[in-house]
Image (spheres, rainbow, N blue to C red):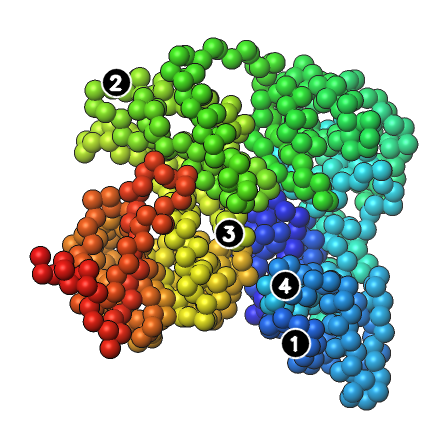
Amino acid sequence: MNAYFATCPKGLEYLLRDELVAMGAQDVREALAGVYFSGTLETGYRACLWSRLASRILMPLAEFDAADDDALYTGVQAIDWSLHLAAHATLAVDAHTAQSKLTHSQFIAQRVKDAVVDQFRQKDGTRPGVDTDEPDVRINLHLRRDRAIVSLDLAGSPLHRRGWRELQGEAPLKENLAAAILLRARWPETYAAGGALLDPMCGSGTLLVEGAWMAADVAPGLHREYYGFLGWQQHDLALWRGLLDEARQRAETGLRSLRPCFFGSDADPRMVQTAKRNAQEAGVAGFFTLEKHDVAHAAPPPGVAAGLVVTNPPYGERLGERVQMPALYRAVGDTLRTRFTGWRAAVLAGDAELGRALALRADKKYALYNGALETVLLTFELHARDETPREAKPLSPGAQMLKNRLEKNLRHLRKRVQREGIQCWRGYDQDLPEYAVAIDVYGDTHGHDHLHIQEYRAPAEIPVETARARLREVVRVAGEVFDVPRERIALKMRERGKGGSKYGQFDQRGEYIDVEEGALTFRVNLTDYLDTGLFLDHRLVRAKLRELAKDRRFLNLFAYTATASVYAAAGGARDTTSVDLSATYLDWASRNLALNGFTGAKHRLMQADALAFLQRDQAHYGLIYVDPPTFSNSKRADDFDVQRDHVKLLEACGERLAGDGVIVFSNNFRRFKLDHEALAERFEIEDWSAPSIPFDFARRADIHGCWLLRPHRPDANVNPWDSARIKK
């Protein structure tokens, strides 16, 4: 089994994950701008040949610390390059660096090349050459936080280069981004249902060609003549030829049954001719109908009742062009609304403002990157009711009062969160009794804000209808004040029934976003669970763990999604161990660790009950973090009550604590009382609750408690404050 990493543009990670799983890849987990997976050599070859979304397929060879150029050179030289590269062959090196002491990627690439070439020269005096275009072996060096990963680039050149594009327009759409647009717009399902594909601003025809190849089961890499593994010493030619033969047979079968349901048009006659040439190169010209006319004249082809309209209008990036763009997008929206009722549509807009100019209500919005440019993909079901949005009703006096309060909070908090680089924070916490909710802001790594609105238990005397009406007002007003569309607002409602007020059934969307905190990246889910995966009120507790972690072994009990372990690793912990009873949370934890580059044996994930783990574990740790639930009645462990059982838990932690170690203990039970009398004889106790509450949680200073416990030094007396409590 080999480990691999497939790179992709940001925004495509989840689609690529699903694609690789469908190919039979194992241990698949997404990261920022890529997906980790494992499999045989055939798995790697198949990903190169069949992935419609990946940019490159990297096969890691070694990982090592590289804080300076000598360490980098030594680490690269430790690899036996004769296993991968012939002495007379050619190579090229791509280097990328982030948050490291070595900051110049060109210098890093030169040092890697020198290390490889010197190894050959030292053996027999020969040396490989350099070919930056199509080398026999392309080496990829990724350096993050002074940790280097050296990989072979099996793709050799970006996989979006399919081999059919002879000509292109001024702003071509990359083929893997086109494939992602089609998948997000559900083109495979539309084609299977008998629908057509129509692009009214087709340019060089990228969306149409990708759509045809997708429908005909043509491998996206079938027309490529160059791959990075073709000159690799361990290349399995027979295996590769077998995969090519299979792909050719599938393409022949698919093209024989492909329907001629691809329609494109463009106002520029040169682009129409370019699209025709590209369709010919791709072998699908016979299935296309391409015409010259502008978007205002686009209409369903005769005899075609339904399908998908997909297009990538210009964004107006050039000086002076931007002012013309809203009118163009309004024309696109008018055409879709008036002529394509019953169709689906997908528009890749330059930004949210241009998307709003369509004047259509999107059912989904996705952030996608067209090169370095962030864009927004909007998908629509074009029903007859899609008309210009109606004017909103005036706000009620209560809703206006809420709006005033939210605007005041925003003015008060935003400057500080921007100054301190905080992207996830609490914007409102039951400030007005009539609107009993907490509103949290989650800024994702694409620069979009999401809102997480959680309803508190309403007083029994408030009618359910009144509470629901107020909740609708909260969603509307919060969206307006924070400028967040409804599809990025997650609402958690309490239901009344037997046993009192409790949260009802959650969604099961499986939709995650990546957010940043403290220059680290975390995965959160705003819809599927009661909690999101990141406790915002513990932001300062996590920062404290990073401060304490340097050169210590770190144990995280009740680890949840292991955000604390990521902080500890970033703070220089020697290793981390994260313990939780839930396999779901441990999988989530592994993704959080991987997103930040913390993988391997140094970062253990253990599925176990915390107390049972402490009883059988023999290791000692310099830093232990304990954040238990208020209570737990899991079938796989004894019942746990934090008030009743915290002394036993902390004493068990003390058995696993190094002599100069620290226990950081926190919990969110607001009536919790730490048993100082029982613990003071063994520990020095510092109540760190007040300093651990972030400024945006100031209204709820009791939202959690936090204590630092250190073992008494042998020559030290019991803390006088604790002794006084014992005497009482």
Q: Percent position (x, y) of residue 219?
A: 71, 51
Q: Which residue has dot 4 on it?
A: 100
Q: Secondary structure at mark 2?
A: loop
Q: What's the CA distance linking mark 1 and mark 2?
A: 68 Å
Q: Which residue has dot 3 on it?
A: 518
Depth check: give the residue in front, 61 or 278. 61
Of circles 1 and 2, the one toward us is 1
Q: Percent position (x, y) of residue 119?
A: 75, 82
Quadrant of the snapshot with the C terminus: bottom left
Q: Earlier in the sequence, mark 1 or mark 2?
A: 1
Q: Pointer 1 and pointer 4: residues touching (CB < 8 Å)? A: no
Q: In the rendered view, does 700 fall on the left or right side of 401?
A: left
Give amino acid for label 1: Ala
Q: What's the CA distance linking mark 3 and mark 4?
A: 16 Å
Give amino acid for label 3: Gly
Name the residue rendered at 78%, 33% in the picture.
Answer: 317
Q: Secondary structure at mark 3?
A: loop
Q: What's the CA distance linking mark 3 and mark 2?
A: 43 Å
Q: Percent position (x, y) of residue 430?
A: 34, 29
Q: In the rendered view, does 121 fall on the left or right side of 349?
A: right
Q: Secondary structure at mark 4?
A: loop
Q: Which residue has dot 2 on it?
A: 463
Q: Earlier in the sequence, mark 1 or mark 3?
A: 1
Of circles 3 and 2, the one toward us is 3
Q: Earlier in the sequence, mark 3 or mark 2?
A: 2
Q: Which residue has dot 1 on it?
A: 71
Is 720 rendered above or below residue 715?
above
Residue 604 shows in this picture: no
